[in-house]
Image (cartoon, rainbow, N blue to C red):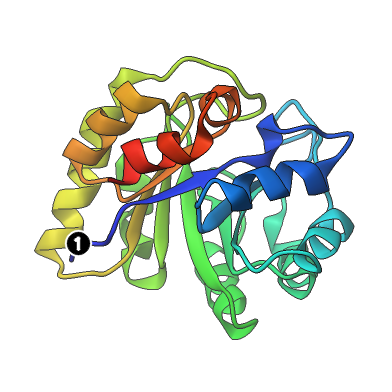
Amino acid sequence: MSHKLILAPSILAGNHINLAESLSIIENSGAHWIHLDIMDGHFVPNLTFGPKAIACLRKISHLYFDTHLMLDNPQNFIKAFADAGSNNITIPVEPTYDIKQTLKAIRELKCECGLSLNPETSEESILPYLDDVDLILVMSVHPGRGGQPFHESVLPKIGTIHQWRKQKNLNFRIEVDGGIDLTTAKACKQEGADVLVSGTAFFAAENKKAFVQAICG
């Protein structure tokens, strides 16, 4: 199943002193999604936003809130982020917890659900969950901070997941996050990705509308 390509700018690369301004920049670019990185200082070596920040942004935006929980125990926080206004909640495959039940619980909270895997994690790890997700997020950098270079080694992984999607006639989206610019976006699209997260390159672009158009075409 093919999807129209979506660019999801990451507010992590925006101005943390004024998140509302960063949100406005994303809205004015013509993007329809915003990517929200939630980090706990344990699963990844950084801390970012909590549910209250998401709820405040939700009050002033109609964008699709694509929330990525980079947490050791995401199952304990899905209701808080659903209540805050997330449209999609993505959880990591690496920690030990009941992934199937957590994905089910996210859908019961009226959100779409996703599953993420880090660059060093084998794509085989997500195979048991392909029927349970709306999105697979392939990290193309080590999660925890913005501005890292794209790991080209993940491109075959994206292609493999795309082939599984076709073989199984499934409808989940394939998202890629990390080091996405005009060049790496093209490479990811060629492998079958249909949601691209861009932070540093998006906010650095002089003409952000043109940046979105160049990627989404």
Q: Position of residue 78 (x, y in %)?
A: 71, 66
Taking 162 as reference, is 118 left or right?
right
Q: Can the viewer see residue 74 in this picture?
A: yes
| Residue in the picture at 65% in, 81% down | 109
Image quarter where the C terminus lies is: top left
> Which residue bears the numbered disc 1?
2
Answer yes or no: is residue 138 visible.
no
Residue 215: image location, x then y, percent: 34, 38
How many tags in the picture?
1
Residue located 83% across and 34% down the image: 16
Who is closer to the viewer here, 95 or 85? 85
Q: Is residue 156 above or below residue 56?
A: above
Could you tell me which quadrant the N terminus lies in?
Answer: bottom left
The x, y position of residue 155, in whole percent, is 26, 29
User: Which amino acid does the dot numbered 1 rest on?
Assistant: Ser
Which residue is rendered at x = 58% and y = 25% of the image? Answer: 200
Instruction: State the image quarter where residue 167 is shown.
Output: bottom left
Residue 65's quadrant in the figure?
bottom right
SS of the residue under disc 1: loop
Q: Residues within 10 Å of mark 1 (few under 14, many from 20)?
A: few
Q: Residue furthest left?
A: 167
Looking at the image, residue 8 sits to the left or right of residue 181; the answer is: right
Left or right relative to 201: residue 211:
left
* Above or below: residue 209 compared with residue 185: below
Q: Residue at x 79, y 59 (%)?
A: 57
